[in-house]
Amino acid sequence: MSSPDSSMRERRRGERVLIRIPIMLFGVTRDNRHVTEEAETAVISRTGALLRAHSAFKPGSTVELTNGFSKQSDKFKVVWASETQKQGHFDLGVEMLTPRDDFWGISFPPPSGSSRS
């Protein structure tokens, strides 16, 4: 029988990296306002990120992010959003609509269990 922690790791599609990357966030908030705001990542993966934003967004909505370092933009789906602000921001879990390895500008560790001999 697997523990809840191991089953959560199995559902994740890749390794997580704790890193703060400035981003511009474009989207429609939970209360239907169009916003453009500065935000930042807290954690990234090949396919998504945990963001810290000033506005609240609805799960299922689409947002556009522009990486503050590379200036690349792409669309993401909000898959999770905190209900209330914590320390002045909302947490958002986002997933790339079209995953690509180069959006964040870093090299990710190889996926667990994919050792090459």
Image: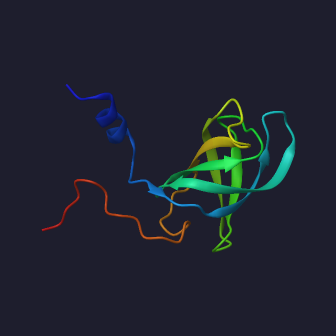
What colour scheme has been applied to the protein in the rendered image?
rainbow
As drawn, 58 above or below 54: above
Q: Position of residue 67 (x, y in %)?
A: 65, 66
Residue at image position (86%, 46%) is 34
Q: Residue furthest right?
A: 33
Left or right of 92, for residue 116: left
As drawn, 73 above or below 84: below
Residue at image position (55%, 51%) is 49
Considering depth in this image, is 84 or 64 the residue closer to the camera? 84
The quarter of the picture where residue 84 lies is top right
Residue at image position (23%, 58%) is 114
Q: Position of residue 5 (x, y in %)?
A: 33, 34
Q: Position of residue 64 (x, y in %)?
A: 71, 55
The quarter of the picture where residue 107 lies is bottom left
As drawn, 77 above or below 19: above
Q: Residue furthest left?
A: 117
Quadrant including the C terminus:
bottom left
Q: Residue furthest bottom?
A: 70
Left or right of 70, for residue 3: left
Residue at image position (78%, 34%) is 30
Q: Position of residue 47 (x, y in %)?
A: 49, 54
Quadrant including the N terminus:
top left
The quarter of the picture where residue 22 lies is bottom right
